[in-house]
Amino acid sequence: MQQHEKLVMMANQIAKAFAAQGEARAVPQIAKHIQDFWDPRMRRGILEHLANGGAGLDPLALAALRQLHPAPQAGAHQA
Amino acid sequence: MTLVNEIDYGTPASKSEKMVTLTIDGVEVTVPEGTSIMRAAMELGTQIPKLCATDSIEAFGSCRLCLVEIEGRPGTPASCTTPAMNGLVVHTQTSRLKQLRRGVMELYISDHPLDCLTCAANGDCELQDMAGAVGLRDVRYGYDGANHVFAKAKDGAANDAWMPKDESNPYFTYDPSKCIVCNRCVRACEEVQGTFALTIAGRGFESRVAAGMSENFLDSECVSCGACVQACPTATLSEKSLIDIGQPEHSVVTTCAYCGVGCSFKAEMRGEEVVRMVPYKDGKANRGHSCVKGRFAWGYTTHKERILKPMVRDKITDPWRETTWEEAIDRVVSEFKRIQFQYGRDAVGGITSSRCTNEETFLVQKLIRAGFGVNNVDTCARVCHSPTGYGLRTAFGTSAGTQDFDSVEDSDVMLVIGANPTDAHPVFASRMKKRLRAGAKLIVVDPRRIDLVRSVHIEAAHHLPLLPGTNVAVLTAMAHVIVTEGLVNEKFVRERCEMDDFQEWAAFVAEERHSPEAVAKFTGVDPAELRAAARLYATGGNAAIYYGLGVTEHSQGSTTVMAIANLAMVTGNLGRRGVGVNPLRGQNNVQGSCDMGSFPHEFSGYRHVSDDGVRATFEAMWGTKLNPEPGLRIPNMLDAAVEGTFRGLYIQGEDILQSDPDTTHVSAGLAAMECVVVQDLFLNETANYAHVFLPGSTFLEKDGTFTNAERRIQLVRRVMTPRNGYADWEITQLLAHGFGLDWNYTHPSQVMDEIAALTPTFKNVSFKKIEEMGSVQWPCNDANPEGSPIMHATTFARGKGKFMLTEYVPTDERTGPRFPLLLTTGRILSQYNVGAQTRRTENVMWHDEDRLEIHPHDAEQRGIKEGDWVRIQSRAGETALRALITDRVAPGVVYTTFHHPLTQANVITTDFSDWATNCPEYKVTAVQVGLSNGPTQYQEDYDAFARASRRIAAAEAAE
Ligand code: SF4
Ligand code: SF4
Ligand code: SF4
Ligand code: FES
């Protein structure tokens, strides 16, 4: 599975777990979950995918990702 | 150093709160009602001679050695079976008693070999002691008559009463010629272990202990727990290691390094050699009991395959080269620095071990966060109980079980979900079974008919054999019954929980689509049984939930944990003894490794890395800036490795290649890395992909603490010098120095002090405190200075309990025409996890291969017979195993364990995982099964690859 496909699958799974609470409450919780548990490169990856049209994303996941803070950029020489 | 001596009070303690006072040998003593006279005397320090009594089992009254005289009562009652009563005046030593006791001893000795000097129990034999205590000076009866001692009579005729030694069990022997038929072993097997493997066969003089149907021990139902060996007052049942080595001269109390029960043991030693491990009565987790792993399977610590020197290699196709610690450490440091320079700081990370101590785990995550400057740290709990952490934290506010093990003694109903305690948590299972035999009711929710469902004197009230993957639907249906049938504990809900959430939840579960009838078509569970089970749980008295990996290792693992929490809250089964939500944790320190901040988003005590206040305390203590962004979890690390953004991994004491799902993906990830460092006892499967191997140490070789499934922190004590040179925490410290960290720990207690200073729930924990109390359960802080056996007594850690909506989302892993069966996985008693340790002990005698359990119906359809090689295919891969045909699994479900590397069960498990935590979905894989003629090509190739990868260059070839 391609990396972005996997991220889409994970985001959709999270969206489904909160879906029962209704869109208004679910969306911020989905966004927070991704913010809290995904490392910056994963967040960048899914945001890139979103920028490219976000194919395959569940509507709730899509809405949540639009609220996601941009992840910090990785510099190659910060070590 | 000396032996830790434990007092044998002769009979178990009484739990009565009513006290009685009596006089024994002129001294008054007050004891709880129901205490035996024998025990009351021992409280005063008076040891009444005894043979058939010991305080782990109920009195039996057969040996007649413990006689006493009571003023005003006729005769000489047995003190072990006579209860203490107000006003009794007891004499333990009179001329009549002396004479009676000598007579009894004389009879025993006349049918006992007099080879004390060469007997393994010499110096630790109660028969010997009693002969001394009663002043036995001669034995009037000769040995010429009937006896069990000699194989042949003097005239050479065979002695039919004599029986040869049974040495079939790899760890202990049974020598019938030394048996005094005191029945202690039989009762220990029944009362303590609950296996009922032993009986007294025959009557009168003929009688002798027999295992099973007079089989040898190995072929009987015996599970080799050792309880009988420990109860035996003579050398009849003796550890082989004791026979081999001799009596120990000192002992040290320590904690088992196998499972999450956390049994306390005395390591009985001669110098630095372990003579035997004996379960410790004061251990609060095990109360003097043990299982075959902790009691006997420690031989791996000196196994010849253990690696004792550091090794390096440039490529994983090269043979290993032994080297010095300096070179190995330098290699890791320079490689990690190079990788970080080349690919970015985030390109490295590490994995902490659930087998290592809290202190070691804490240091590994500290090295990663403070030394590597990243939060890419994770632990094997990812693949087992991470959903527990997430789910319980959401509902209650803490990521841990709510009870101590003792709590089970007050349970009236036990609901066991996705756990197989008799195999995975044997000592706790014995305690459950004891309570079940005393009348508590049992509900089992499991696809497989686990042993607990029906065993000697135990029968589950309800077994709900659900289809793998439908936990959430079944538990929500139970909630449906409770809500719609008016079984809600309204007082508890009103006082203790968030009302808005509750009301929304109650309306949700009450929907018709969640009824047992509606869900039956995909769960496979009989609605009437489900209703009855829900009613029993809600109304049967104190109800406790015990659950295991069958709950967490699913794509809805976290949701299932929340559904469990909902059930406990809605019925008010929280906050007192006998109730609660209890995850049965797998590895010995999986609770501890989670507590210690092993997750990429959390510091110790479950505090998010983005919390500026928390981070500031760590930054101040560690003197460095820390990263506020969550790091990668194990599956994410592997994905990132394949993608090329993750290149260096330090793994302490885990074998992710064998234990993690989707082996091909794991090996692709590992193979893509440029520096994999494995610190372990053996060249494990992951080490096949490693570039540096740092030899680790065993629990016998270090000090530290483990935290068991009941949040109990217990000491691990060093009893021998590390054979590899260093304890694991010292190795991490050497690495830290390489990364410029100025650590100067000289003892793990200093690490615990740092943990306490940084972690509010550990504030009052210290080695000193644990030493004084024996063990302590966190939270241990100013609010709970003595620790917390039971949590959430008056309020939840988060304040009010939170009901969560638990929508059932079917896993993407569905069966279809190509993969019509569901595979689920588990473990068995004698082996531990990936088996790296237990496979290197005699425990292999009980489980020398993993088998595929398949229902007779599914087997017949495929022409599979018992023992046939079968191929199992999933969309991830295929492997082959031999079949075991059984109706323990339902039609449509197959089951296997994964203790042996050749099994490669994880080649077929997929990379689906829990939505919240990425805990892999081990428990459901859609598969097809068909006949095959042996191991698959993959298995054979892998075996060849593993052999090649384990080559170590001959010493002279190195430099
Ligand atoms: S070892 Fe345990 S199971 Fe086996 S006979 Fe003894 S008490 Fe019973
Ligand atoms: S084997 Fe030991 S414990 Fe069992 S009856 Fe014989 S002497 Fe007693
Ligand atoms: S493996 Fe578990 S149950 Fe067995 S002795 Fe060790 S801690 Fe106890
Ligand atoms: S110890 Fe009391 S009868 Fe044996």
Image: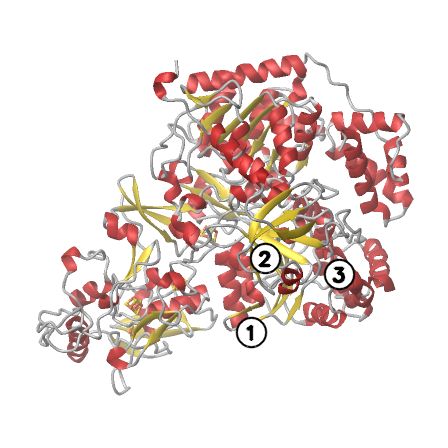
Marked residue chain, label 3: B
Q: Earlier in the sequence, mark 2 or mark 1?
A: 1
- Within 10 Å of disc 3 (Cα), the crowding (few <14, some 14-19, many 20+) is many
Distance from label 3 to label 1 (Cα)? 29 Å
Number of the front mark, 2 or 1: 2
Q: Chain of mark 2?
A: B
Tell me the distance, in whole angstroms, between the alpha carbons under discs 2 and 1.
32 Å
| Number of dots carrying numbers | 3
Look at the numbered disc 3 and give the secondary structure of its residue. helix
> What is the three-letter code of the residue carrying label 3?
Thr
Residue with the mark numbered 3: B523
- Protein chain holding label 1: B
Image coordinates of residue B238 in percent, x first then y, are 29, 58
Task: Give the number of the disc on residue B853.
Answer: 2
From the viewer's perspective, is A50 left or right of B201?
right
The answer to whether residue B582 of the structure is visible from this angle is no
Residue at 18% of width from left, 69% of height from top? B149
Q: CA distance from mark 3 to mark 2?
A: 20 Å
The amino acid type, in three-letter code, at marker 2 is Glu
Q: Between residue B732 and residue B879, name the one nearer to us.
A: B879
Q: State the image quarter where residue B123 is shown.
A: bottom left
Q: Amino acid at mark 1?
A: Gly
Q: Residues within 10 Å of mark 1 (few under 14, many from 20)?
A: few
Q: Do circles 3 and 2 both sit on a common chain?
A: yes
Looking at the image, is mark 3 or mark 2 earlier in the sequence?
Answer: 3
Indicate which disc, 3 or 1, sits on the residue closer to the N terminus. 1
Q: Which residue is mark 1?
A: B439
Which quadrant holds the N terminus of chain B? top left
Q: Nearer the viewer, mark 3 or mark 2?
A: 2
Would you say the beta carbon of the disc 1 residue lies within 8 angstroms of ligand 1?
Answer: no
- Which x, y percent locates residue B143? 11, 73
Q: Is residue B159 left or right of residue B735?
A: left
